[in-house]
Image: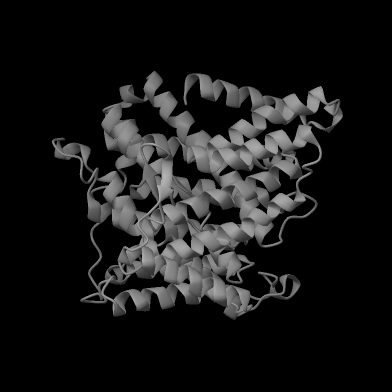
Amino acid sequence: MKKYFEFEKLGTNYRREIIGGVTTFLAMAYILAVNPLVLSLDGVPDIPDAMRMNKGAVFVATALAAAVGSLFMGLIARYPIGLAPGMGLNAFFAFSVVLGYGIPWQTALTGVLFSGLIFIVLSLTGLREMIINAIPAQLKYAVGAGIGLFITFLGLQNANIIVGDPNTLVALGDLSQGPVLLAIFGLVITVIMMTRGIKGAIFYGMILTTVAGMLVSLIDVPDKVVSSVPSVAPTFGAAFEAIFNNPGELFTTQFLVIIITFLFVDFFDTAGTLVAVATQAGLMKEGKLPRAGKALLADSMATVTGAVFGTSTTTSYIESTAGVAAGAKTGFASVITGLLFLLALFFSPLLFVITPEVTAPALIIVGVLMVSNLGNIEWTRFEMAVPAFFTVIAMPLTYSIATGIAIGFIFYPITMLLSGRRKEIHPIMYILMVLFILYFIFIE
C-alpha cells in the first residue's frame, strides 16, 4: 500500500493521509444535505410533483457518486482529491434546465450522462491532458490563487461574515449573531493552531467548532446516530429513459446547449481544481500535472456513474485543498474520503452537525494558503500580469471558477502577441480563446 501510493517519496504516512481524507470529507459533507434540496426544487412552490426529484433517492445517489468518484481518483490517479456532485452545476440542472427550460429531470440526467461519456472519450484520446499541459505555468498559478480567493469568499459568505448588500453588493455581516460568532471562533482557533504548526489544525479546528456549537446550543445534538438507507430506485437508471422512450427530446438545440454547458463547466472547473490541489500538495512537475490523463478519466467516469445513480454532474472538489492542508498528499486520502461517503449512507443524522459555520474557517484558511501562488507570477511583465489578474479577480466576482479561467485565457494570447512573445503561445491557447469567446456570445 505504501509503495503504491509512494508514501516515502512524498514524505507522508497513514496518519496524515487519514486525517487529510477525513478533513476533505468533512469539508465536502454539506453536499449530502444540499444536493437533495437543490435537485428536488425544495422551496419552489406551485410546480408539479413530476418536476421534483425524490430527496431520499438523490441523497443516496449523491453519496454513491461521491464514494465511487473519490475511489476512482484515489486508486486510478492517486491524487488526494475528493469528488461529488458539483455546486453550481446542480443549480444549473435544477433551476435552468428543469425549471427554466421545462425539460424533465430524467432527460436532464441524460444530458449529464452524455457529457460524461464524451469526457471519457476525450480523456482516453489524451486531448484533455494535452489542453491542461498547454496552459502556461503563470496562468496555472493564477488559477490556483483565484480559486483561493473564491473559496475564501465562499467561506465568509457561508458564515454570514460577508453578506449581500443592495447598494454595495457585499458588506460586513452582523457579527453579534451566534452562528457568525461560532464561525469566527473556529477561524481564530484554527489560525492559532496553524500558526503554532500543529499538524491537522484544520481538521481539529472543525471538531472543536462543532463541539463548541453544541455546548452553546447553536448546533443540535443528533437524536440518533444510525438511520436506514433510503431507496435509490426513483432515480436509478432514469438517465436512460429519454434514450429509449423519448429519443426526440435529444435532438433539440436546447438539449445540445445543455450538454455543451455541462461539458464546459465540468471541464474547466475540474482542470482548475486539479491544478490548484496539485500545486498546493507540491505535486506539479515543471508546470505540468503528472498523471493528468488518469485524473481526468477518473473524473469523467464519476460523472457517468453519478448520472446512472441519479444526480447532476460529479466533479473534483476544491474543498480537497482542506485535506491537503491537513497533510494529504496521495490518493490514499481520497480512498478514505470515498469510504466515508459510503458510511455516510448509514450515519446521515451525524452529517447535519457539520454546518456552514463549521466548514467556513477551513475554506478561509485554505484560501490564505492558496493565494501564495500569486508570488510565482511575473507581475512586472504587463502582458502576463493582465490575464493573470483577470483570472484571479473574476472568479470571486463572477462566482464562477470557469468564468475566471475563460476571461484570463481570452486575454493571454492577445497580450502575449502584442508584446512580441508569439513563440511562447501554444497553438491550443488560440483555440481556447476562440471557444471561450463563442461561449460568452452564444451560451453565457
User: In the displayed structure, would residue 234 be above or below residue 9?
Assistant: above
Q: As displayed, is residue 196 above or below residue 66? A: below
Rendering quarter of residue 3: bottom right
Residue 158 at what x, y percent from top left?
39, 55
- The number of numbered discs placed on residues in the rendered structure image is 0
| Residue in the foreground of this view, choosing between 190 and 199 | 190
Residue 131 x, y percent position in the rendering: 68, 37
Q: Is residue 115 visible?
A: yes
Q: Which colour style is shown?
A: one colour
Relative to residue 13, is residue 178 drawn left or right?
left
Q: Is residue 154 above or below residue 433?
A: below
**Quarter of the figure with residue 380:** top right
Residue toward you, 159 or 280: 159
Residue pictured at 36% horizontal, 67% vertical: 354
In-image side of 171 versus 241 (left or right): right
The x, y position of residue 321, in whole percent, is 57, 60
Is residue 202 at all visible to an observer of this figure?
no
Task: Residue 199: give x, y in percent of width and height.
Answer: 60, 78
Quarter of the image for the N terminus: give it.
bottom right
Q: Nearer the viewer, residue 33 or 171?
A: 171
Q: Residue at x 48, y 41 (%)?
A: 399
Q: Is residue 107 above or below residue 287?
A: above
